[in-house]
Amino acid sequence: MSRSRGHRQKLPWPIVLIAAVATAFFLAPFVGLMWRTPWSKFTDIVTHREIRDALWLSIETSLITSMICCIFGVPLAWLLARVEFPGRRFIRALTTLSMVLPPVVGGIALLFTFGRRGLIGQYLDRWFGIRLPFTMTAVVMAQCFVAMPFLVLTVEAALRQFDSRYDGVARTLGGSRWYVFRRVTLPSIRPSLFAGFVLAWARALGEFGATITFAGNLPGTTQTMPLATYAALDSNPESALILSLVMIAIAFTILIVLRDRWLGRTDQGVPL
Amino acid sequence: MFSRRALVIALAPISFFTACSSSHSQSSSTLEVYAASSLATPFSYAGLAYEKAHPGVKVEFNLGSSSDLARFVQEGAPADVFASADIANMDKVESKDLLDSQAVIFATNYLEIIVEKGNPLDISSLEDLTNPDLIFVTANPDVPIGRYTAEVLKKAGVSMTPDSFESNVKGIMLKVASGEADAGIVYHSEVVASDGQVEGVQIPTEFNIVAKYPIGIIKNSTNKKQAQGFVDFLLSPEGQALLTQYGFGIP
Amino acid sequence: MTLDTRFALIRGSFELNVDLSFNEGEVVAIMGPNGSGKSTFLHAIAGLLPVTSGILILDGATLDDEASDAFIDPTQRTVGIVFQGGLLFETMTVLDNIIFGLRARKIKRADAVTQAEPLISQLGLTDLLERQPRELSGGQAQRVAIARALVTQPKVLLLDEPMSGLDTSTRQLIRQEFREVLAGFAGYRILVTHDSEDAIAMADRIIELDHGKVIWDGPVSQYREKR
C-alpha cells in the first residue's frame, strides 16, 4: 500500500470508494423520500384518523409480540443452548426457517393452519367459536412468526457463550435452577436479551406479507402501518410518504437510543 | 499494479448494472403486456394464440391490480400495452401523457356475489351481506373491484363494514374459495374462471354496474407494431370470442 | 469419617477410573497433565457430573450410587468449589457474591451479611465488599471465591487450579495465604493443580492422574524425594 510519512497513513482509496458507493446506496432512498415529502401537510396527515389508528395498532401489536417472543423465546433459547436432546438441530433449523421464508409464505402457512378451515383452526372454530383471521390476534401471531427467530438466535448465542461453570458454582452454593437462572444467567445475558427484544420488535413493526395474508387488511383492526402505507400508495401518495417517514423515524430512533444503551452495557465488561 | 487491479474490481459492479439495463433494448420480439388480474385466464390464451400467429414474438404478462399497474407505468415501467379493469386507472396513465393514442374499450364485465360452494349460509341478496357475523371481504378502494363494489352497495342502499380490504380481486377469490371468508363481490368472469370452486349469487341489474375495460399502447413502447397487433387481435372476432368464453362481455 | 470415591466416569471416549479415600485432616493435591481427568474428578464430587458406575460416599452418606440410582443434587451436597480465576458473578458486587449461597437458601439479607462477617474479616475482604468483580486483582478474586464457597459451611472444599492465571510473584505471596486459609478450614480439602511447586507448598498428600488413572498416591515428603 502506501508508505507512511509522518503520522498518518493514507487510506486505501479502492476500499474507501467501494464503501462510499455502499453508503450512497443506503442514503439515497431516504434523501429521495424526504425530498418528495409534503412537509407543510405533515401535521394534517399524521393526525388523520386512519393514520393514527395504524400507528397505534402497529405499536400495540409489536410490543405485545415482542413480549410474547421473550416469554416463549427465552426458554426455547435456553433449551437449544444448554440441553442436548434428539432433534435439537432440527428444532433449531425450524425456528430459523421463518427468517428465511418470504413472509407471504409464512402468512399462507398460518392461514391454512389457523384459518377457519385450517388444520387447527377448524377445531378452534367448531369447538370454541374462535376465529382468528381478520382479528388483531392474527396480526400478533403473524408478527410473532417472523420475529421470534431474531430473539431466539440472539439469546441462544449469548447463552452458549456464557460459561456453564457459573451455573455449576451457583448450584453447589445451593441455588435452585430457577434461582440461578434469575440471579446469575439472566442478568449476564441481559444485553443480548435486550438486543434480541429490539430486533424482534423492529421486525414485528415492519411486518407486511404475513400480516396481510393471514390477518387481512382492515383499518383499525388489522391495518398496521406497513399495510396502511401500501393502501395509501395509490389513493393518497402523500399519506404514503408521510407514513413511510414516520416509520423510518421510529426505526431510526429505536436503533440509536437503544444501541447506545446496549453498547454501554457491554463496555462495562458484562460477560455476554 | 495493485491500483490497476483495484480499479477493475471497483468498477466491476458498475459495468454489471449497465449491462443489465442495456439488455432491454434487444427485446424487439417480446411484448410486455400489463393487465388487470381479472384478465388472467383469457389473456393467457390470447397470448398463446397471438404467438402462434406471429412466430418469433413472445408475449409476457405482468398481472396485478390496475392501480398497481397504473402506478408502475407512471413510474416508467417498460410496458408496451396496458389493459385496465376501469377507466379511472387508464385516465391516470393518460393524464401523464403516456399513451400513444386514445385508449379503446375492448371488454366489459359485471359484478357478482361469491360464496362458498353449496352456499351454506343461504345468501341470496346484497342485504344478506350486512349480517355482522358474516365475514365479507372486498378490495382497497383504488383497486377497480373495490370501487365498483362500493358503487353497487351504494346503489342498493346497503351499508356495512367489510372485514378486510384485499389488494386485488384474486385475494378476494382466495379468501372465499378457501373458506376463510363467507362472501365477497368479484367480477362475473372470475366466477366463470373459478370453474366451480366458488358459487355465484346474482346481483339485480338495477344495482349492478358495467365495468368497462380500456386498453392502450404505451408511448415509450419499443414494440408498437406488435402492441397494435395484439390490441387488434383482442378486438377481432377471435379475440372477442375468447373473452366471452371466459365470462367477459363485448363492448 | 471419610470421603470415599470409588467410581468410573465415562465422557465420550475418556474414562476416569478411581478408587480413593480421603480423610478430613489432610490437604490433597491432585496433579496431572491436561486431560488426565482432574477436573472431571472434582465435577463428580460436586455433583456436576454423574458417575457412570460406582459410588461416592461422604461421611457415610451416599452422594452418588449408580447401581441403586441414588444421586444427590449439587444444591444438596455440602460441597464448595472454587474455579480458576474465581469465576465470580460479574453482575453483582463482591458482597452479593459472598452471601450468594446464604441468599439462595432464603436467608434474609441482613442475617446473611452478619453470618458472613467473620469469614470476610478473616480473609481481609472488608474493604472490597462494594467493588465489582472486574475491579479486583487475581489474588483478591480468588479470596472472594473462597469466601463465597466457605460461607455455606460445606464439608468439602474443592479448588480447581486455584493459582492459575496469577503471575509468579503473586503466586508466591498467595501460596502462604492459601496454606493458612486451607489450614483454617476443618473439612475435606482437595485441590487440583498442574504445578508441582504449588502442590508441594500447599498439600499434605499428592495423587497423580494420567489418562484417567491414578498412577501415584503418597505423602508430599515421598513426592519430593521422587522428583
Image (tube, rainbow, N blue to C red):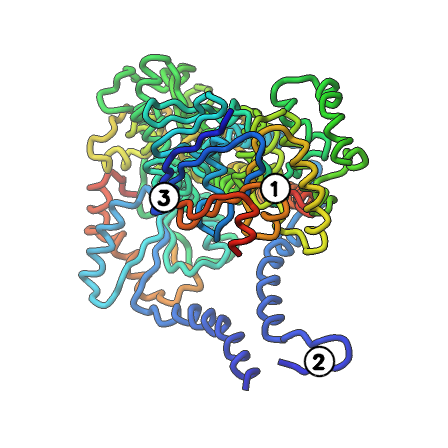
Mark 1 belongs to chain: A
Binning the other alpha carbons within 10 Å of mark 3 as few (below 14), some (14 to 19) or many (20 upward) gives: some
Q: Quadrant of residue C123?
A: top right
Q: Nearer the viewer, mark 2 or mark 3?
A: 3
Any part of residue A188 in sight: yes
Same-subunit check for callouts 3 and 1: no
Label at residue A247: 1
Residue A135 x %, y %: 46, 24
Q: In this view, does B90 lie to the left or right of A19?
A: left
Mark carried by residue A4:
2
Amino acid type at circle 2 is: Ser
Q: Quadrant of the C terminus of chain B?
A: top left
**Distance (Cα) linking label 3 and label 1:** 59 Å
From the viewer's side, name the closer residue of A90 and C70: C70
Badge nearest the viewer, 1 or 2: 2
Q: Which residue is drawn at 61% across and 29% down?
A: A183
| Disc 3: host chain | C
Contact check, label 1 and label 2, Cβ < 8 Å: no
- The quadrant in which residue B174 appears is top left
Residue type at numbered disc 1 = Met
Please give the residue where the numbered disc 3 appears in the rendered image.
C15
Rendered residue at 62%/44% (across/down) = C202
Residue situated in front as seen by the camera: B193 or B237 = B193
How many marks do you count on the picture?
Answer: 3
For the residue pair A44 and C165, the one nearer the viewer reads as C165
Instruction: Read off the chain for label 2.
Output: A
Judged from this view, the residue extending furthest toward the bottom is: B1
Which of these two is toward me, C65 or A209? C65
